[in-house]
Image (tube, helix red, strand yellow):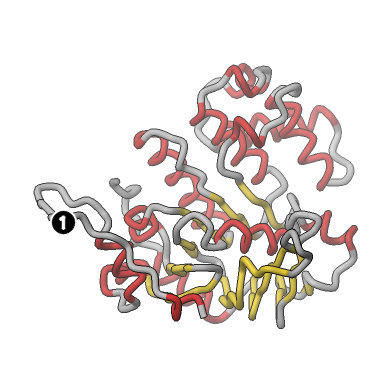
Amino acid sequence: MSAPPDPHAPRAAHAAHAAHAPMLMVDDLRVAYPDRQGSLVEVVRGVSFTLGRERLGIVGESGSGKSQTGRAILGLTAGRGRVRARTLRFNDIDLLTCPPRQRRELRGGRIAMVLQDPKFSLNPVLTIGKQITETLRAHAAGVSRAQARQRMLEALAAVKIDDPARVAALYPHEVSGGMGQRAMIAMMLIAGPELLIADEPTSALDVTVQLEVLRILDDLVRERGMGLVFISHDLRLVASFCDRVLVMYAGRVVEEVPAARLHEATHPYTQGLLNCLPRLGATTRPLPVLDRRPEWAA
């Protein structure tokens, strides 16, 4: 698909800033769940990266550990899951040892996550405006109802929603997928987070709406100086939108490459993903089959 206008412009500045001031440090992150026999099975195995005020893409097949990595950072791993790491730090906060109350204050406040499908993420019995103002009042002390409503309307306007007052009064089932996704972004951004994790934020949208959502995210990273972790299956999208790309396979990072040079990736798994992309005007026979080797998961 096509990229947002001028996607490469901020890359050099973001990468330089990120090199000097990482806001997120992840070293040897591991997430495991018990199987039916009670043995722990790792679904994220030794993931390491740093993130500054930039756009980091994480790509891979379903089940590669992308979403589990994002949830572990945010503290949303399911109850039976076990998270450990040598380092899991957000600015000066150790995310592994900070008290549960501090972790709740971070979640939705300084760190936010946009989930994949707004139809399942938004509360069906509350209006969109009510859900957004609740998020603000949970993380901003001393905000009156009138102030919260005004900021909610401004947040909806910031994600390019026309007539925010009308949309604020609607329930999630009354809006389109693209409108719901933009409302989700407004909800996650109203408290002014420093780090945003976007898990497949455009997968359920048509191409035109995808471009609008990407422009919104791009503007927020540039104007607010946020860090963005962008989780996606779409290699072309990540290559055109992000600054760096992590390629995950079987819970591991098998390759890290600058997004603009993703086509030069050297790992056979990354090359296999790229070879599976359709090309207009080209006939490929037989169709490429993605190779999976046991040693890549070792």
Mark 1, Cα crowd under 10 Å, few <14 / some 14-19 / many 20+, is few
Which image quarter: residue 175?
top right
Pinpoint residue 252: horizontal percent, then vertical percent: 53, 73
Pinpoint residue 291: horizontal percent, then vertical percent: 33, 68
From the image, tell me which residue sits under label 1.
286
Tell me: 211 left or right of 167.
left
User: Where 219 falls versus 147 (above or below)?
Assistant: below
User: Where 219 falls versus 163 (above or below)?
Assistant: below
In the depicted view, which residue is nearer to us: 92 or 49?
49
In the image, what residue occupies the spot 53% across and 51% down? 220
What residue occupies the far front of the structure in this picture? 37
User: Where 109 falls versus 123 (above or below)?
Assistant: below
In the image, what residue occupies the spot 23% across and 59% down? 288
The three-letter code of the residue at mark 1 reads Pro
In the image, what residue occupies the spot 81% across and 47% down? 139
Tell me: 178 left or right of 235.
right
In the depicted view, which residue is nearer to us: 15 or 278?
278
In the depicted view, which residue is nearer to us: 297 or 240?
297
In the image, what residue occupies the spot 55% across and 35% down? 182
Which image quarter: residue 80?
bottom right
Pinpoint residue 68: horizontal percent, then vertical percent: 63, 59
